[in-house]
Image: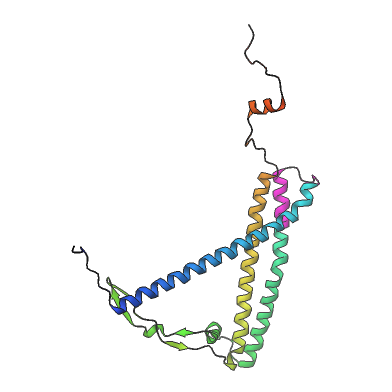
Amino acid sequence: MRAFVDVTLSQSDKRLIFIFLFVFIIIFILIGLIGVVIRRITKLMETRMDYEIHEAVIKRVISTPEQLRKYGSIKNRRRFFLESIPVFCIIIASVIAYLVNSFVTGKWADTYFANFGDLFYQWDWDNAVMVKVFGLEVLSEWPAVSNAPHIEVAHIGSYVLCLLWILAMVYLAIVTQAFIARGFLLNRRCHTVFGKSLEGFNYFQDDKEKGAPNVDSTPKK
């Protein structure tokens, strides 16, 4: 039986498909790992809000959802400020490192992240071989390595500054995520702590279990 579409893949097309599949799998795994980390951090940080509002709720100091939301928000903002103090310390340290590095090297405007790239592999994307597939230019083969990881003594200051900036951004992202997670949990607690639910309640079944008398609701003439 003759096929309607005859698809013949060259060696270059096979390599291209393999590269696309490999990149897709790596991205999929990274997204999954990031999702797992975010979920675990959120679960861990949520428990802090219960700790903050536990005493006030148990001792009946708070009696309405509005009071709980206001009290919890104050506690959440205070916790966010305390957890953000290391970020400000890192920023101050990076400013001091920047001033010292600029004073020693005499360069007050440098390509810090470009210098930081010395520590990683880099590929020559400008000279990458491209082919046309269905009218689109796509990568035919992986480009050549243009830089292998190495350390330049003149770029030590850039390494330190970039590490401090990255550390500050990651820490701030975690602290912000914790702040949002506590806010979501606080909103749920405002509904569950003072909530009145009839889930699973049946009027007639409840009366039978308690042995209540069967009262005839039919009006007497």
Residue sitting at 64 percent across and 25 percent down? Answer: 204
Residue 50 horizontal/vertical position (percent): 72, 54
Give the total of numbered labels: 0
Indicate left or right for 57 with 17 as reference. right
Residue 138 seen in the current view: no
* Front residue of this view, candidates 44 and 135: 44
Give the magenta-colored segment's residue range: 59-75
Does the magenta segment cover residue 166?
A: no
Indicate left or right for 34 with 10 as reference. right
The main secondary structure of the magenta stretch is helix
Residue 59 horizontal/vertical position (percent): 81, 46
Residue sitting at 69 percent across and 28 percent down? Answer: 209
Does the magenta segment cover residue 67?
A: yes
* Front residue of this view, candidates 137 and 95: 137
Quadrant of the image containing the C terminus: top right
Quadrant of the image containing the N terminus: bottom left
Residue 7 horizontal/vertical position (percent): 25, 69
Up the image or down, 199 lies above or below 4; here it is above
* Front residue of this view, candidates 41 and 10: 10
Residue 171 horizontal/vertical position (percent): 64, 70
Q: Residue furthest toward the front?
A: 1
Q: Residue furthest toward the top?
A: 221
